[in-house]
Every structure is written in structure tokens, then in C-alpha cells.
Image (cartoon, grey):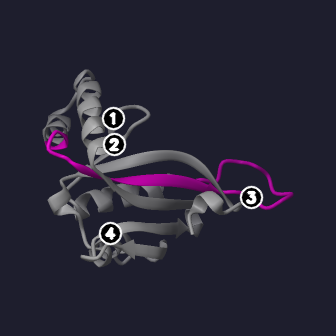
Amino acid sequence: MSLFGDDRYQWRETYFVLFRERDRPSADDAVRSIVGDDNRFDVTDVRADRKGHLDSLTLTSPDDFAAMDISYVSGDEVTEQVAELTQEVSRSSMTGDDREKLKHLSQCDARFDIFHFEQRMADGEEEDEFLDPAALLIVLDRLSRACSGVAIDPQSGSFM
């Protein structure tokens, strides 16, 4: 079940991991890469295509008050977006590492959408900011490594 339909969570932002289709990980490899030996994550609703490649999954990190829906996208939507992101990112000041990521980005033809959610507080609890971005940053890093991809914040047009 998608977290969009779960009243316990509120959508915060969306991030992308762009990669080459040929580097799409299997569902098992993706889960192993994301979770590692870290017990902070609970992974559910893992879906794969006929070849076993990751299509989608839901991940929660209760200690971080965070959750994520991750889903695979490919096709014209991605290639058009890569062209737009390449132009947008190339206009900003970049480090040497960013230039390498930009070069890799131009070769990408698939992506994972990472929908980041915050766990809502129970009635009567204060609405202070409890969301810890650590879970998101860990997932972006590990998923990027699993597919030799590039993590991007599309709102700012910057690499993660």
C-alpha cells in the first residue's frame, strides 16, 4: 500500500535517483543495499517485474519519523527530464565531483522516484519538527550505489 493513502504519514518532498536502465538492480539486491546491516529500516510491499528488477517498495524508519515510497520510472518522461536537469544543473557552480555526476546524468534513461514522508504526531502531541533527514540521505546514497546512479533534489536542481 502506498503511503499516500496512509493517514499516519504526510508527503514532504520527492527526490530522484537517475541511472542507466542496464544498471537497474534486482528487487533483492536493492533491498539488501538499502537496508544493509542497519536495523533502522522496515521494508514492505516490494514489487518486481518479471525479470526480478525492482519496481517499487515502501520503507519506514520509525526512529526518524520518516517513510518513503520508491518506484521505478523509464521512457520518454525520464529522457526529457534528464535533458532539462542537465541544462539546469550545468548553470550552477559545480565541484569536480558534480561535473562527474553531470557527465553520468546525461547517460541516464531510468529513475527511481523517492517520495519522502513524515510521520504525523498523534492527537494531542506537539507539532515540533521530529523528521530526521538521515534516513532519506542514507537511502539516496545506498540506492544510488545499487544502480550506479545519481541522486538529485529536483526542487533545487542540485545533486545530493
Q: Nearer the viewer, mark 4 or mark 3?
A: 4
The alpha-carbon separation of the residues under discs 2 and 4 comes to: 19 Å
Looking at marks 2 and 1 on the same chain, the residue that comes earlier in the sequence is marked by 2
Identify the mark at residue 97; answer none if there is no mark.
none
Looking at marks 3 and 1 on the same chain, the residue that comes earlier in the sequence is marked by 3
Stretch in magenta: 104-131
- Residue 144, picture quadrant: bottom left
Which of these two is toward me, 22 or 157? 22
Q: Which residue is mark 1?
A: 158
Image quarter where the N terminus lies is: bottom right
The alpha-carbon separation of the residues under discs 3 and 1 comes to: 30 Å
Local crowd at mark 2 within 10 Å, few (<14), some, or many (≥20)? many
Q: Which residue is mark 4?
A: 54
Amino acid type for the residue under numbered disc 3:
Met
Q: Which residue is mark 2?
A: 152
Residue lying furthest top:
91
The residue depicted at 26 percent of the width and 52 percent of the height is 110
Which of these two is toward me, 141 or 12? 12
The residue depicted at 36 percent of the width and 78 percent of the height is 37
